[in-house]
Image (spheres, grey):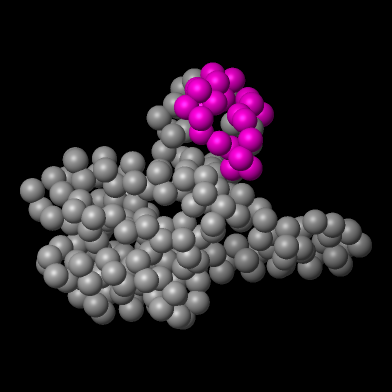
């Protein structure tokens, strides 16, 4: 069984307090390690944004994971590529450390070139979405439409809501096929908090599912 290091990250203290984002990533990594034959000797947890050119300086746990990976000549495994970063230049910088990174959702065979490619495509998609949003807002303004809550703050809140919903994806996938009411009951029984920290209702389940479908 090959030795590996696990790294999990959430962007906000609220996500860390709920435990949902970290727990979902840890569960995904445990399943991946068991399937692919990896022994996760240590898990490094980080609560920090992945944005900014100095992101690595602000992420001591990732730095520690890199150090341990070099000592053990082991790869670092993350659940999703965006748990490392959403920035292609940051991903390129990590590759220069010559420590192998494995992204569970992409599979064990995804090489550094593929990681660069996925990061570049994700970054381009974000720019395109941002530009389409700006164009739509501009067109609406030209038509005399009051923009209301769909401003920069509203867009930020919407994106944060989608990220919180993403943390619930593994659990909802496990319960797929059940009615929204049944899923809500199961989540409440497991003491899984909603993205807002409250109890689950059928409407809450449907709202989160729709957010995931939009990603």
Say if 132 sits above or below 201 in the image: below
The location of residue 81, given as percent across then percent down, is 37, 59
Q: Is residue 117 visible?
A: no
> Is 195 on the left or on the right of 63, as rendered?
right
Q: Which residue is at 80% across, 56% downward?
A: 149
Residue 12 as seen in the image, left or right of residue 42: right
40 falls in the magenta region = no
Image coords of residue 195 (percent x, y): 59, 42
Q: Which residue shows up at 8% across the image and 48% down it?
A: 1
Q: Is residue 202 magenta?
A: yes
Q: Where in the figure is residue 164, as x and y percent of width and height?
A: 55, 48
On screen, residue 187 above or below 35? above
Q: At 73% from the left edge and 58% from the top edge, which residue is drawn?
A: 154
Corner quadrant of residue 37: top left
Magenta region, residue range: 181-203
Q: Is residue 30 left or right of residue 142?
A: left
């Amino acid at each position: 069984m090959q030795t590996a290091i696990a790294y999990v990250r959430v962007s906000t203290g609220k996500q860390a307090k709920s435990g949902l984002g970290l727990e979902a990533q840890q569960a995904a990594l445990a399943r991946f390690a068991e399937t692919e034959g990896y022994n996760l000797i240590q898990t490094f947890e980080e609560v920090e944004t992945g944005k900014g050119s100095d992101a690595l300086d602000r992420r001591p746990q990732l730095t520690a994971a890199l150090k341990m990976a070099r000592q053990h000549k082991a790869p670092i495994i993350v659940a999703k590529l965006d748990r490392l970063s959403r920035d292609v230049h940051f991903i390129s910088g990590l590759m220069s450390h010559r420590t192998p990174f494995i992204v569970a959702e992409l599979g064990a065979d995804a090489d550094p070139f593929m990681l660069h490619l996925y990061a570049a495509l994700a970054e381009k998609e974000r720019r395109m979405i941002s530009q389409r949003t700006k164009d739509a807002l501009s067109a609406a303004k030209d038509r005399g439409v009051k923009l209301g809550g769909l401003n920069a703050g509203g867009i930020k809140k919407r994106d944060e809501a989608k990220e919180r919903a993403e943390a619930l994806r593994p659990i909802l996938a496990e319960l797929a096929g059940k009615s929204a009411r049944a899923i809500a009951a199961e989540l409440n029984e497991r003491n899984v908090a909603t993205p807002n920290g409250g109890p689950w209702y059928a409407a809450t389940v449907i709202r989160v599912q729709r957010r995931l479908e939009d990603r």
